[in-house]
Image (tube, grey):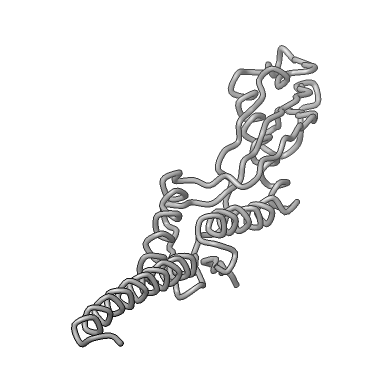
Amino acid sequence: MLDAKKVTKINKVLAKGKLVVLGALVGILLGVGGTIFFQNYNPPDEDKGAAATAVFGRFVEQAELVGVSQDYCIVDKYPDVETFFDLFDLPWTANSVWYRYAGTLKAGVNMDTAEMWPEGTVIHVTLDQPYIISNTPNMDISGVLEENNNILNPIHVEDVDEIQRECIRISEENAVEGGLLEEAQIQAESDITTLFKSALGDEYQVTFEWRGTQ
């Protein structure tokens, strides 16, 4: 039969054993709980808002977001004739130039005026209407194809300059009528949405408001 001293000693050993077991269980629970916590942890909304702002800053730094580009080539005849006090033409003064003008148009969005604000998992973006950013001529193929000069009404350099300006006007007018700016708008929305979702996750939605929309 165990005496009182041995019973007390055994109880102390068992108590230490319980503490070790409890300590191990607590450690396991903390470890498992911590793993689950960090796996499912979502940063506060203000952190996501800061991240969205940083993402948007990448676009704003570009100043201009080029959405689409389009090549064009205009070939046309440009006649000219002197007149008698604008009353009638003087046919013996007629001249003409066949001119080819080729280039590349780029359309996009001005990011300097862009605005963005997050609202939960929705990112609101406000932009100005797309516009033609650049119209760059291809001088390797642009130029006079045929010239019918007239000593009574010679062709001057300024005449060719005027033809070029007319070609630029026509190219941009045709591009706008052909939907180039609408394509730039669609592309801008796609590019901005893709970057936000890549940085923040697919659960985020991006909405767009275009200033000046009727």
Question: Residue 181, how many percent across, how many down?
Answer: 65, 53
**Which residue is rendered at x = 75% and y = 25% of the image?**
100
Residue situated in front as seen by the camera: 194 or 73: 194
Please say if 90 is above or below 3. above
Question: Residue 208, how many percent across, how many down?
Answer: 56, 67
Drawn side of residue 94 relative to residue 106, left or right:
right
Name, please, the residue furthest toward the top: 151
Please say if 19 is above or below 188. below
**Which residue is rendered at x = 59% and y = 64% of the image?**
202
Drawn side of residue 92 relative to residue 53, left or right:
right
Residue situated in front as seen by the camera: 104 or 117: 117
Image quadrant in which the C terminus is located: bottom right
**Which residue is rendered at x = 41% and y = 66% of the image?**
31
Residue 142 appears in which quarter of the rendering?
top right
Name, please, the residue furthest toward the front: 1
Please say if 179 is above or below 89. below
Residue 90 appears in which quarter of the rendering?
top right
Q: How many marks?
A: 0
Drawn side of residue 166 relative to residue 22, left or right:
right
Name, please, the residue furthest toward the left: 5
Q: Does any portion of residue 175 appear in the rendered image?
A: yes
